[in-house]
Amino acid sequence: MDELPQDTIPLTALSPDERTRALQRYQILQPCLEHGMPLSQRARHHGIPRRTLYDWLAQYRRHGLA
């Protein structure tokens, strides 16, 4: 069975604002995760530094959506 890492926080434990921010970030990353779209393309499209998207992606992979 797949278990969550020990430091993973359930999405329901976040405040409404934190949950909204997590979902917004995931929506930006989703085409990269599911369809292999380059992060640089999403960064340009959303006006976000590419390094920020790399950080978000690393956090998502380490801790999940929350």
Image (spheres, grey):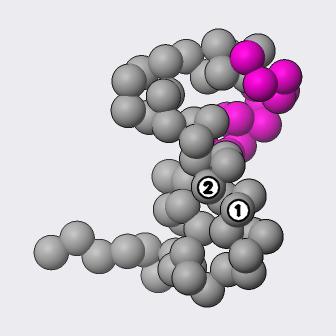
Quadrant in the picture for residue 5: bottom left
> Distance from label 2 to label 1 (Cα)?
5 Å
Q: Secondary structure at mark 1?
A: helix
Residue 18 position (above or below residue 9): above
Q: Looking at the image, which residue is at 47% across and 81% down? A: 6
Task: Give the residue pinned by disc 2.
Answer: 23
Nearer to the camera, 40 or 15:
15
Residue 33 lies, in percent from the top left, at 44, 34
Residue 24 position (above or below residue 20): above
Disc 1 residue crowd, few under 14, some 14–19, many 20+, Cα 10 Å: few
Nearer to the camera, 46 or 52:
46
Q: Which residues are magenta?
A: 45-59
Q: Is residue 10 magenta?
A: no
Direction from residue 16 to residue 59 in the image, left or right: left
Disc 2 residue crowd, few under 14, some 14–19, many 20+, Cα 10 Å: some
Direction from residue 30 to residue 15 in the image, left or right: right
Say which quadrant the N terminus sits in.
bottom left
Dot 2 and dot 1 residues touching (CB under 8 Å): yes
Asked if residue 58 shows in the view, the reply is no
Residue 35 position (above or below residue 60): above
Main secondary structure found in the magenta portion: helix
Quadrant in the picture for residue 23: bottom right
